[in-house]
Structures are given as structure tokens and as C-alpha cells.
Amino acid sequence: MKKIKYFYNTHTLRYEKLVTPLRVKLLRVFGFVASVLVAGFLFTQLAYHYFPSANEKKLRRENELLSEDFTSIQKEINRINDQLHEIEKRDNDVYRSIFEANPLPDSIRAKTIEKQKEEQILAGLTDNEINRSIQNKITELKSRVLAQTQSFNAIEEMVRKKEDLLAATPAIQPVSNKELSRLASGFGYRIDPVYKTVKMHAGLDFAAPQGTPIYATADGTVRLSGNVGNGYGNHVIVNHGFSYETLYGHMVRTKVRAGQRVKRGEVLGWVGNTGKSTGPHLHYEVHKNGRPVDPIYFFYNDLTPEQFDRMLKMAVTGNQSFD
């Protein structure tokens, strides 16, 4: 039998029956149900954490291994990324600077590079998201490596062209002249030995005994070898490429033929006195883009700074040419 409770009402000064309102009853029921639900949830979480099933243990271990693998791969990717960044920096600041080439912008090195924040909680990543993140990083590195490879190939081509240019640039004296005593007339306006008028002398005259060997001053291909009646007598013209040509005049005899490839230092012929000449000598010219330039500035493989200064003073002396 349910007990009936009473309370003393101070206003009416009498005992009255205690009646519980419906609202209070509902709140009590709701509180009880909520307590049961919370207790059940906590119990489930504790049971899952401390007493997982065999399948849950397997999945948890797999997730831990995936997280460890991802962390290891991410560290390796970051290491490779740092190394590649250093290579790119050296490529721009060193290698391309040497060959006066413009640095490659990042957009060329990796068009798909987008700076993304990597501060993601590994536990919150699904397997697909982990795989996608790794694939994106690998794709980015492949793109940068490909661009860097192309850059190095371009630099290699620049090196080859630079080597070819150096080999094709006149750089030695056309006759042996260790004592610097054979330079007889320089580039510029000189007195013509025949007409006794001032005319442009488009090269250098080297006085030497007949039969003195004449050397190619750079690699190239013989364009002309012989006497065509233009005043140079027996002469050779070598096309070196890169807009350079050299002319060797008044030979007693030529050794090479048109179309022949020659190397710097190879004998082209011998000093003579053919054509419009007043004595055995070599007339030597250097042409750039079809125009004669002063050959005195193309002996840098032969002369020390002191020797060049001495030879320069000899070349600018106004005198009579040999042709």
C-alpha cells in the first residue's frame, strides 16, 4: 500500500496531503531515462576501449600500422622535397647563372604544385584520404623531377654550345711568334705599299720567312683554298660557325682543300709572297658577321697580359703594310 505523505501548511495552519505535480513526475522520468542512456554509452565506450572484440583489435592494429607507414613515408617525402628544393636553388643560382640563362619559375618546374597545409590529424584520415595524399605528393615530386631533368638537359646543351663556341672562336696567333717580333703591320688605316695612299688594312701582317707554317686559329670548315685573283694570292678562308671566319693570305702553297674540317693549330699552308705582296708575309683577317674586326683581340690563348699590352702597342703603330 502506497504511503500517503502530509505536510504542514503554515498559511492554513493545518496538515495537508502532499500531491506531486505531473511536471515533476515527467522530469523525474526523463532524468532516469537520461541517466540510463549515459551510463549505457559510457559502459559501451569502456567496453570497446578495454574489452575490444577480435575484429576490432585487428582493425585498430591495421590503423596503427597505416598511420606509422604514412608518417614514415611523409618524412621520406619531406626529405626528398628538401633535397629537390636545394637542387632547384643551385640550378637557378649557380648553373644557369654561369651560362647566363634565365632561372626556371616554379610554375614550369611543377605546374600542379599547390601549397597545402599538412597539419591534419592522422587518426581522422580514411585509407582513401591517406592514399590520395601520398599519390598527390608523389605526383608533385615526379613533376618537379621531370622539369629539373629537362632543365639539366638544357644546361648540358648550353655547355656543349659553349664548348663549340670556344672551339670556334679564333684564339691563337696564326704563325709561331713567341718573341712577338713578327707583327709588321696592324689593323686600321695604313700606307699602301704599291699605291702609297692611305687605305684600310683589314687585318694583321706577320713577317716570316717563306715556308713558315700557318696555323688555323680555331676549329672550322675550309670555305676557300686557292688563288681567285683578288690580291690575296694563294689563300685560305675558314668558316668557324657562330658568325666567325678567318682569312690567311699570300701563301706559297696551301695544304687544305675546300670543305675540309680543320682543328685549331692544324697547318693550313705556308708563308709565301703570292698575290699583291711586297715580301714574304702572312696577311691574317678575322671576320665577325661578315665584317673584318681587329685580330689583335683574338690571341687570348697565346699571350699573357703583359705580352698582349706589348703587342697591342706594336699593332697600333702607323706604318706601311705589306699588301
Image: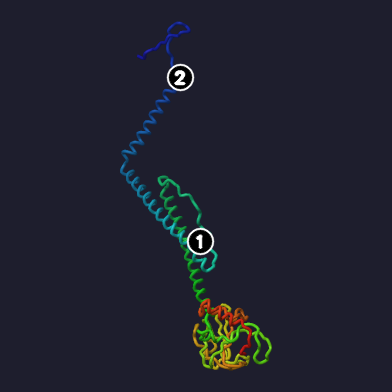
In screen coordinates, is 38 left or right of 112? Answer: left
Q: Is residue 281 above or below residue 44?
A: below
Residue located at (65% from left, 84% from top): 189
Q: Quadrant of the C terminus?
A: bottom right
Q: CA distance from mark 1 to mark 2?
A: 75 Å
Rendered location of residue 49, percent (x, y): 34, 39
Q: Quadrant of the N terminus?
A: top left
Q: Nearer the viewer, residue 173 or 8?
A: 173
In screen coordinates, is 124 left or right of 215? Answer: left
Color style of the picture: rainbow
Residue located at (43% from left, 59% from top): 83
Visible residue check, residue 25? yes
Rendered location of residue 205, percent (x, y): 58, 87
Amino acid carrying mark 2 in the image: Leu
Q: Secondary structure at mark 1?
A: helix
**Mark 1 neighbour density, 10 Å: few (under 14) some (14–19) many (20 or more):** many
Q: Which residue is mark 1?
A: 109
Visible residue check, residue 241? no
The mark nearer the N terminus, 1 or 2, is 2
In screen coordinates, is 284 left or right of 53? Answer: right
Q: Nearer the viewer, residue 178 or 157?
A: 178
Amino acid carrying mark 1 in the image: Arg
Rendered location of residue 118, percent (x, y): 45, 49
Q: Secondary structure at mark 2?
A: helix
Q: Nearer the viewer, residue 139 or 193?
A: 193
Q: Nearer the viewer, mark 1 or mark 2?
A: 1
The dot on residue 22 is 2
